[in-house]
Image (tube, rainbow, N blue to C red):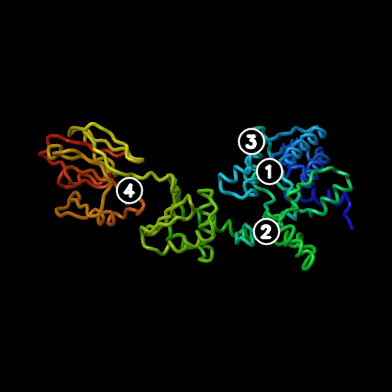
């Protein structure tokens, strides 16, 4: 037996009020596809516009995937908006090309572009809310897809009722309720012919799998999954807060690098290591990493310092003594080759600048930072060369009579592996004069007999 129009409307009103989705004086942009769900949403919000005291507008994205049918959807949405006397915004994108360039499925490409355009219009025109017409059936599909793909607790939480300014007031309604309402109201809508094809993941799940579940196991599977996803959502929210607290305590982010302090991370329950890594990467890099990447990160924490792995096509993770460093592979400025440095000159090497200038005794000001050093110019014969250190390099650290391997000295100074590989030295006639930013060679130090002084500076 079909529910009455009033019952369906009251269901949505209660959901909006319980979840605090719409506030007085909101300016609302409706994602209008022209299908039965968005047409229901449009008419519902127009009917209750005065009650909620809101301003309305509609937006339609032409995906250009179905030729004349796609263009027909766009024209239909434009006419409906005009007939309802609400502003209409429109965008046309080549989703097939976008999917190919970004190596995405058509479904994922359409979703990304749609939200990008909605947010762009909302920002440009000052809309406080974006409303989409996702319903309980959509939630069922999302939960099952995420379950099959192993997306974790958050994936099993289903479609979020609210995400920033995006709200979904129809998640409490079944598709059958929406269709019944539209039929009783005699609302005209468009039917997407591709929805009956099972070549897309969602369509296959909807048309083949869920249909069988409803016929053979539970006709009310959408309601059951909606209740379950609400329970999982509450558990997931609790765990997110727990993990966020640990992320705040045991991570830091500077210069595009995420440092995870493993000594502090040990305070978290080991069963949540995976969720910890996934949440930390999402927070600082806005990247979703796969289960295999999470497993690799868990293994990395017990590896030797210096071990590095790729955790996605964009991120590198390096094990240090008591930490893991994660950074974007494309943003790390590698130093390669070598370059000569003349006195009075400044050279930029990667993200560093090194200068060499004459000075006098009265201007000498020693610091503990290691970024400014002084050497005896009278001991210099030859040209200064800046290069990376290499295996076998030795020097006489200031204050020492015997030489030491650069590799051993860097280890003693507890230089992190990802920094060690980029360490620079300045040499002259094959001898190291300065382990840049750390220590000068004792053979070139100034003394009371020094007449000419050279200042080495790192910025």
Q: Are marks 4 and 1 in contact (CB under 8 Å)?
A: no
**Callout in the foreground (2, 1):** 1
Label 1 crowd (10 A; few <14 / some 14-19 / many >=20): some
Q: Is residue 26 visible in this depiction of the protein? A: no
Q: Between disc 1 and disc 3, whose residue precedes? A: 1
Residue 65's tag is 1
- Residue under numbered circle 2: 143
Mark 3 vs mark 2, CA separation in Å: 30 Å
Q: Are marks 2 and 1 in contact (CB under 8 Å)?
A: no
Secondary structure under badge 3? helix
Quadrant occupied by the N terminus: bottom right
Instruction: Residue at 73% x, 57% y: name it.
Output: 206
- Residue 343: % across, % down: 21, 33
Label 4 crowd (10 A; few <14 / some 14-19 / many >=20): some
Mark 4 vs mark 1, CA separation in Å: 49 Å
Mark 1 vs mark 3, CA separation in Å: 27 Å
Is residue 267 placed above or below 65 in the rendered structure? below
- Residue under numbered circle 3: 123
**Callout in the foreground (3, 2):** 2
Secondary structure under badge 1? loop
**Callout in the foreground (1, 3):** 1
- Residue under numbered circle 4: 422
How many numbered markers are drawn? Answer: 4
Q: Between disc 3 and disc 2, whose residue precedes? A: 3
Secondary structure under badge 2? helix
Decide if residue 411 is on the left or right side of residue 111: left
Secondary structure under badge 4? loop
Q: Is residue 141 visible in this depiction of the protein? A: yes
Q: Between disc 3 and disc 4, whose residue precedes? A: 3
Quadrant for residue 427, please give it.
Answer: top left
């Amino acid at each position: 037996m079909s529910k009455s129009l009033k019952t369906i409307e009251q269901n949505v009103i209660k959901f909006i009020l319980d979840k605090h989705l719409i506030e007085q004086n909101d300016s609302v942009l409706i994602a209008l596809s022209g299908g039965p769900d968005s047409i229901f949403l449009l008419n519902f919000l127009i009917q209750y516009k005065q009650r909620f005291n809101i301003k309305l507008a509609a937006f339609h994205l032409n995906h250009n995937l179905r030729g004349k049918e796609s263009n027909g959807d766009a024209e239909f949405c434009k006419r409906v908006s005009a007939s309802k006397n609400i502003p209409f915004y429109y965008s046309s994108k080549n989703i097939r090309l976008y999917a190919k360039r970004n190596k995405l499925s058509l479904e994922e490409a359409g979703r990304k572009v749609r939200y990008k355009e909605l947010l762009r219009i909302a920002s440009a025109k000052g809309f406080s809310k974006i409303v989409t017409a996702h319903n309980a059936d959509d939630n069922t599909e999302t939960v099952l897809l995420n379950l099959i793909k192993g997306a974790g607790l958050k994936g099993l939480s289903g479609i979020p009722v609210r995400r920033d300014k995006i709200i979904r007031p129809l998640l409490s309604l079944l598709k059958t309720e929406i269709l019944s309402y539209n039929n009783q109201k005699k609302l005209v809508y468009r039917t997407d012919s591709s929805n009956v094809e099972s070549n897309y993941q969602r369509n296959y799940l909807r048309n083949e799998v869920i249909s069988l579940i409803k016929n053979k196991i539970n006709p009310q599977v959408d309601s059951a999954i909606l209740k379950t996803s609400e329970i999982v959502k509450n558990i997931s929210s609790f765990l997110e807060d727990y993990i966020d607290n640990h992320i705040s305590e045991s991570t830091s982010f500077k210069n595009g690098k995420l440092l995870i302090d493993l000594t502090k991370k040990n305070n978290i329950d080991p069963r949540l290591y995976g969720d910890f890594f996934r949440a930390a990467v999402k927070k600082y890099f806005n990247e979703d990493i796969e289960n295999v990447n999470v497993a690799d990160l868990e293994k990395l924490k017990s590896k030797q310092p210096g071990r590095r792995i790729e955790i996605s096509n964009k991120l590198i993770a390096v094990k240090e003594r008591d930490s893991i460093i994660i950074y974007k592979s494309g943003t790390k400025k590698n130093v390669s080759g070598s370059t000569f440095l003349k006195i009075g000159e400044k050279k930029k090497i990667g993200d560093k600048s090194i200068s060499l200038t004459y000075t006098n005794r009265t201007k000498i000001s020693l610091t503990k930072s290691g970024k400014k050093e002084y050497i005896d110019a009278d001991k210099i014969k030859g040209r200064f060369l800046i290069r990376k250190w290499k295996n076998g390099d030795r020097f006489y650290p200031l204050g020492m009579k015997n030489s030491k391997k650069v590799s051993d000295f860097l280890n003693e100074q507890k230089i992190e592996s990802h920094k060690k590989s980029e360490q620079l030295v300045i040499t002259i006639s094959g001898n190291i004069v300065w382990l840049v930013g750390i220590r000068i060679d004792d053979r070139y130090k100034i003394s009371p007999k020094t007449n000419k002084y050279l200042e080495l500076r790192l910025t």
